[in-house]
Amino acid sequence: MSNTTYQVPTMAEMAAKGESPEVLFWVGCAGSFDERYKSVTKAFVKILNKTGVSFAVLGPEESCTGDPARRGGNEFLFQMQAVSNIQVLNGYNVKKIVTACPHCFNTLKNEYPDLGGDYEVIHHSTFLQQLINEGKVTLKGGGTFKGKKITFHDSCYLGRANNIYEAPREVLEALDSELVEMKRCKTKGLCCGAGGAQMFKEPEKGDKDINIERTEEALETGASIIASACPFCMTMMTDGVKSKEKENEVKVKDLAELIAEGLV
Amino acid sequence: MNYLSQLLFLITVGIATYILTKRISRIRKNIMMGKPLDRSDQPNKRLNTMLMVAFGQQKMFKKVIPALLHLMIYLGFLIINLEVLEFVIDGFAGTHRIFAPFLGDFYTLALNFFEFLAMAVIVSCVIFLFRRNGLKVKRLSMAELNGWPKLDANLILIIEISLMLAILTMNATDQIIQTRDLAAMGMHPYTKTGTFFFSSFLIPLFQNMDTTALVITERFAWWIHIIGILGFAIYITYSKHLHIFLAFPNTYYSNLEAKGKMENMKEVTNEVNMMLGLPSESSEQAPAEIGRFGAKDINDLNRVNLMNAYSCTECGRCTAECPANITGKKLSPRKIMMDVRDRSEEVGYSISKGGKGLDDGKFLLGDYITAEEINACTSCNACVEACPVNIDPLSIILQLRRYQSMEESASPSSWNAMFSNIETSFSPWKFAPTDRFNWADEVKKEEMN
Ligand code: SF4
Ligand code: SF4
């Protein structure tokens, strides 16, 4: 493997060489399997490579954090997942984890400590913000996004669940774009409709789907990019934009994709 | 005659205290039906939360105009109740405005301030009555409020207006009586108090009455106010208005952890550790008695959940922010809280009558709250964020879901499918676990520049 291509080292490979990375990138199930979100994973890996961050992934050893099982009420299954994952993570002596999924982030950060998994966990929005602040990310000046209207859709599991509102916005501002807010944003942000395991079932009877309500609000801002920072929000907003037949004018993009596009 | 009124006062206060104590102890017992929950940590932070959220009404100020009107009523009640101290002393001692001679001009100033607050309370309550019944604000006119909750809300406003009017009437007639010659009637003259600005506008209404009628009116207003306050205190224990007391402990004991964190079920951890062959924390200790997994009825919930239900003002701020409710689903976090309270009251009442209590064949889940409601929740925490007294409807919803899944295996079928995907392929979707790392193949081939 030559060093001119992107590297995705696994924990197992590193351990075999007696090395340990600074940070573990927890990819998550959506990041590993979902066609759309895989490109977010790749974008983030490219950023990690280009900024020279020492990282590794678990690769085939990764497994669902258990979040959807827990929210669906199956505590037993959640804990089976969590305890097994913690054994793997502790086996590699992991100290710091970064993930692009707010649900994984919340579970790893807030829920694993009760089961013996204590790590410093950061969401990729905060991680990107830190890279930008440290000057490690250099963006093409005035290029791709200059003057473009971008609106940010708050993920419930980043925002209200963990009080992260500013990091993703600072990342977007670094792009030199024009950040426009939806009527309901930050603490009042409206859910995309997928949290709490809703992603994995049809909605209950109602007058409207939640993602349509949210997409309408996003479209009202006149933004040409809806930025998100969560795989479930990504799916829901993309579906919403499609059902409004706006997919040619309005794109739904993850923060990591936007930064990767703007990288020098 | 004086002794008679003192005796009457004593009896009135006695009866009210008796009923009130019984009610408080009933509510306490109802809340104690819940499971204990240790929230004795971080007392300073808790105190601070209570001061900011309950005393300082921090979260009310997300909507400024209702917050200001509500603040007027709140301050009015808090401060005007200082005057009740005088009422009580007068009532027991058979005196009249016992503080007036001691405080002199300050008494006049204080009472003018109280009257200003009384006016502010009246104005605010009238606006609230109009908003509730005339403007049809959605969260205040939803079907879940039909019947008692709507009547309750209006009654509270009307009682508050009446209590304030009683004060103003009493002060107006008192001022006229001060100018009359009571000695001629063999009575002690009324203490001079100086002019009360707001109530003096009412003087023309009573000016033409003879002195006896005036004294009767003044005394009547005094009694109405004191009986009104005592009655109101009892009334609120049956009403959503209980938040005026419970908001304080409720915010003190509110959740201080990240909102996204779900409470860990220790009893499950022990089993999981055993299954995975790991040392389990309490393997040496006798296993704690395991009730139900999750919650089916109020005694499965914790005490903070139940106190939450008694603290709920039914304001609907939670429901107005709930994505499920906004899009027409049955779920309403406010209704969840109302159901928990109704069920607690039902069980408590039955127990107090020697009835079956919890074993009446009814359950919170099923008879009050349906599966359709709890399954619609996205766990978005909008309700928790919106609640002005830090109530957590989500915690209850998630405990009900735990019961549904772990005791009944009655989760929606797509969830059951998702559970089995996680069990067999370690991902909520049905993909081969060996394909998990395939995404890296392409990116590894790409040139970096
Ligand atoms: S957490 Fe559930 S009940 Fe509360 S607002 Fe969100 S969807 Fe509604
Ligand atoms: S739970 Fe809170 S926000 Fe909801 S109705 Fe009750 S007091 Fe209002």
Image (cartoon, coloured by chain):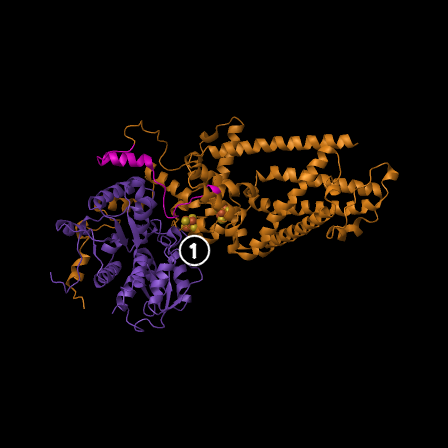
Chain colours: A purple, B orange
Residue corresponding to mark 1: A187
Query: Which quarter of the rendering shows the N terminus of chain B?
Result: top right
Q: Residue shown at 41%/35% (left/top)?
A: B300
Residue in the foreground of this view, choosing between A194 and A209: A194
Q: What kind of residue is marked 1?
A: Thr
Residue A239 vertical position relative to residue B200 in the rendered view, above or below: below
Residue B189 is drawn in which quadrant? top right
**Residue A21 location (% of width, % of height):** 20, 53
Task: Tell whether position B258 is magenta.
Answer: yes
Please state the extent of the stretch shown in magenta in the rendering: B252-281
Left or right: B256 in relation to A81: right
Residue at the far right: name it. B184
Horizontal and vertical percent position of residue B123: 65, 53
Which residue is depicted at the point 81% across and 45% down? B178
Quarter the C terminus of chain B occupies? bottom left
Q: Can you give x and y, in whole percent of width and height, for residue B393 in the image?
A: 44, 45
| Near-viewer residue (A11 or B148) | A11
